[in-house]
Image (cartoon, helix red, strand yellow):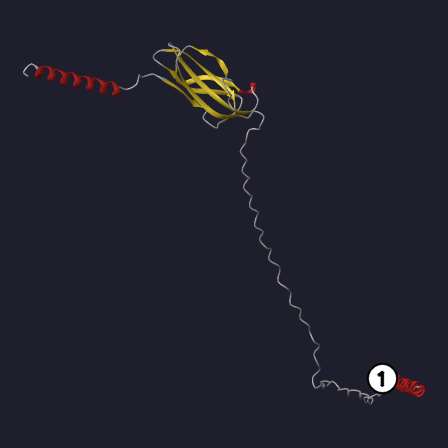
Amino acid sequence: MKRTWPLILTTLILTGLSAMVWRGALAAPPAQGDLAVITSPQNNAIVRGQVSIQGSATHPQFQFYKVEYAREPVTGENFVIIGAIHEEQVADGQLEVWDTTQVPDGSYTVRLRAVRLDGNYSEYSVVQVVVANAQPTETPTPAAPAATPLPTISPTPLPPTPTILIEQPALPTGAAIPIPTRVAPLPTPAEEGPSFSLDVAPLQTACLYGAGVSLAVFLLFGMMAALRNLIYAILGRR
């Protein structure tokens, strides 16, 4: 039993040390200097002409990097290299210059690949970069010039209206003042008496209506007499 305790204690110590080493390995920060990123242009950017592609491509085992583009939608490896392969690292600088006048207008994906010595690589892509060389560049609308205030017109004062004085001739002393004579109004002719006119149209209508009624009554009685004679004749034969 005494020999077992040192063995158990040694095992516990080694297990603890292994756990500490394992935790330290997990908590260790990743290797510094591994960076592949495009900072300009960004997603959904609209570009035209000569476009400077900015970013970084660095790694402790750096071999080379390249910048490529592909028309969207991207299908497989249809990327085309921009410029050439670069064997020098770039940290926050210009990676390549893309002449967009050599490609049709449309939406593109721009990709950066930083390849390491072991053949592995880091990759970064910017999507929906729209090339718009055929579209006119938007120019700001000039502001309308400020309206010039109109000069204020002061009214010219009119000269005073002259007062017209009518001088009446002076009457001699003791002369009588003529008095206007009133003229009596002419008599108004007497109004004529009311006129009487007879409208014969209603009388004609009444006469015609009475004649029509009389004729209808006469015909009715005649038809009744004829019908009676006809009935008597039929009964007499029987």
Quarter residue 20 falls in? top left
Q: Which residue position holds label 1?
A: 202
Quarter residue 40 falls in? top left
- Does residue 105 appear left or right of residue 60 in this picture? right
Q: With respect to residue 24, does 141 lie above or below?
A: below
Residue drawn where x is 14% and y is 18% of the image: 12
Q: With respect to residue 70, does 237 lie above or below?
A: below
Residue drawn where x is 11% and y is 15% of the image: 7
Give the quadrant of the C terminus.
bottom right
Tell which residue pokes out farthest to the front in this image.
238
Can you give x and y, in whole percent of width and height, for residue 17 in the image? 17, 17
Q: How crowded is mark 1: few (under 14 residues within 10 Å), some or many (20 or more)?
A: few
- Does residue 41 appear left or right of residue 181 in this picture? left
Please name whichever residue, 14 or 135, is drawn nearer the observer in this view of the structure.
Answer: 14
Can you give x and y, in whole percent of width and height, for residue 175 in the image? 72, 85
Q: Helix or strand or loop: what does disc 1 sit on? A: helix
Q: With respect to residue 131, does 197 lie above or below?
A: below
Give the quadrant of the N terminus.
top left
- Does residue 45 appear left or right of residue 210 in this picture? left
Please name whichever residue, 8 or 203, is drawn nearer the observer in this view of the structure.
Answer: 8
Please name whichever residue, 140 or 233, is drawn nearer the observer in this view of the structure.
Answer: 233
Please name the amino acid that badge 1 sits on. Pro
Can you give x and y, in whole percent of width and height, for residue 99 in the image? 53, 18
Residue drawn where x is 11% and y is 17% of the image: 8
Please name whichever residue, 9 or 238, is drawn nearer the observer in this view of the structure.
Answer: 238
Q: With respect to residue 146, does 74 lie above or below?
A: above
